[in-house]
Amino acid sequence: MIIAIDGPAASGKGTLARRIAAHYGLGYLDTGTLYRAVARDLLAAGHDIRDEAAAIAAARNLDPASLDDPFLRDRGVGEAASVVAGFAGVREALLALQRRFAKRPGGAVLDGRDIATVVCPEADIKLFVTASLEERARRRYHELRAKGFEVTREQVRDEIAERDRRDRERDTAPLKMAEDARLLDTTDLDIDTAFKAAIALIDEMIGR
Ligand code: DC
């Protein structure tokens, strides 16, 4: 079974995807990590984040063993990832790895922006997880404050809005809901309620 989960930044899709994978005993790939790692490698090699040729080379040379790096979750890396994710050559270079993971024996959950539309259009289950901008900003703000970052709610909201815009408006594989995906709006749901709602949707789709 392949479960594709897409949605905008800070929608809760990552936490949900991880819990869904554990619930059904499936492998889990956070595909945002791949783009984050490309941005990290590109900057570490001293290139500009807008250097397309260098970004493509970084994607082609990505070491899958380097994805555990806690630095990838840092504030700012998501922004940089969103820039390199706009290059078609970067996306192309990361496609085979994602598809290989999806086809692993035993099944997989992948989360990202284009899983249901591009990476795994044949997925058995497609969920689009979203929440209002205000609510996503509120969650991310509390997360960042808990980690000790001095940010304001407005800064966080502006950053998320900018990332949404970039992810939605790019030419290649933009963030959008697949026609055959089910929508899960978590604006008014805490994580446990959202998880139960996701499991109910999936069980209904697989006829359990
Ligand atoms: O989900 P995330 O915040 O870790 O993703 C970081 C960036 O990577 C996101 O802003 C856009 C890009 N991304 C993408 O373009 N396609 C994916 N499947 C996953 C992430």
Image (cartoon, grey):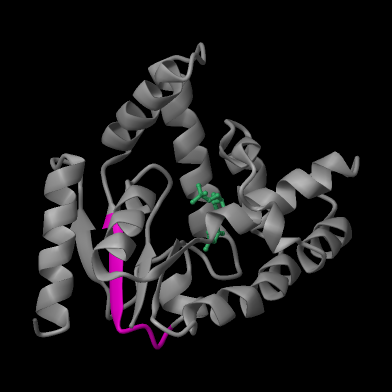
Residue lying furthest bottom:
122
Quadrant for ligand 1 reads bottom right
Q: Which residue lies at the image location 72% right of the left edge and 66% below the top edge?
A: 90
Looking at the image, is 194 positioned above or below residue 201?
above
Q: Is residue 100 left or right of residue 140?
A: right
Camera-nearest residue between 169 and 123: 123
Q: Quadrant of the C terminus?
A: bottom left
Q: Is residue 197 left or right of residue 21?
A: left
For the magenta stretch, what is the residue range? 121-129
Q: Position of residue 22 (x, y in %)?
A: 30, 61
Q: Quadrant of the N terminus?
A: bottom left
Looking at the image, is 34 positioned above or below residue 136?
below
Report the number of discs. 0
Q: Position of residue 183 (x, y in %)?
A: 22, 64
Camera-nearest residue between 44 and 9: 44
Residue 197, quarter of picture: bottom left
Q: Is residue 89 left or right of residue 139?
A: right
Q: Which residue lies at the image location 90% right of the left edge and 44% below the top edge?
A: 45
Camera-nearest residue between 107 and 146: 107
Looking at the image, is 129 positioned above or below residue 50?
below
Q: Is residue 83 magenta?
A: no
Q: Is residue 126 magenta?
A: yes
Q: Which residue lies at the image location 29% right of the left edge and 53% below the top edge?
A: 16
